[in-house]
Image (cartoon, helix red, strand yellow):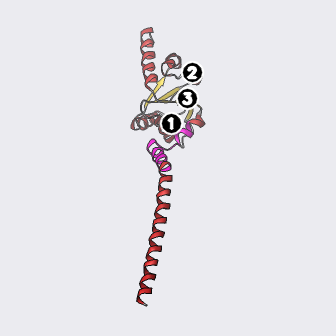
Amino acid sequence: MKREEKAAAVEALQTSFGAAKAAVLMDFRGLSVAEMTDLRRHLRKAAVEYQVVKNTLAVRALGAGGMEGLAPYFKGPTGVAISRTDPLAPARAVLAWGKGRPAFTLKAGVVEGVVMGPAEIAAVAALPGRGVLLSRILSVLQAPLRNLASVLHGQLRALAIVTDQVRQQKEKAQAG
């Protein structure tokens, strides 16, 4: 690779890392060409960009996106899955694809600037989506108001029952 090509590759990687919300590094040794093609297709459907990178060039480019902590993981064959929109997308897509494939290995990842190991990436991938989390928060916020309304409604119902019983007693007293 010529110096100009290396500079262009580093610049392209800096742009990718700088715009990334999350990135997951994986070792692709032992995967066949068909499996790599399937992985790329799976990641593309999840709006995740996948690149096989040269380690020295990737380490030079890491500073752009605050991903300097990933530098020690760029050893051996390394593929990088990057998402510019959803911070959980690369972890979810990569782990979903990698289930049941013994040759597949996660190295590390970074989600919103936090470097994580394989176990942490798996934990992040297991988190529910943004919409689910927001609905859970809203449910928790609504619970006290809902309970208050229920208690007040119960008291009003009890008052209505008591007044109805008083009315029935007065009607009986007047009739008899």
- Judged from this view, the residue extending furthest toward the front is 174
| Image quarter of the N terminus | top left
Q: Amino acid at mark 1?
A: Ala
Measured from the top left, where is residue 102 in percent x and y?
A: 57, 39
Inspect the magenta stretch and tell me whether residue 138 lies in it.
Answer: yes
* Residue corresponding to mark 1: 91
Q: Nearer the viewer, residue 106 or 77?
A: 106
| Image quarter of the C terminus | bottom left
Secondary structure under tag 1 reads: helix
Measured from the top left, where is residue 50 in percent x and y?
A: 44, 29
* Residue corresponding to mark 3: 114
Inspect the magenta stretch and tell me whether residue 53 lies in it.
Answer: no
Q: Amino acid at mark 2?
A: Ala
* Residue corresponding to mark 2: 71
Tell me: residue 113, above or below residue 92: above
From which residue to which does the magenta span run?
Answer: 121-140
What residue sits 55% from the left and 29% below the top? 114
| Quadrant in which residue 163 is drawn | bottom left
In space, the residues marked 1 and 3 are separated at their CA atoms by 13 Å
- Judged from this view, the residue extending furthest toward the bottom is 176
Secondary structure under tag 2 reads: helix
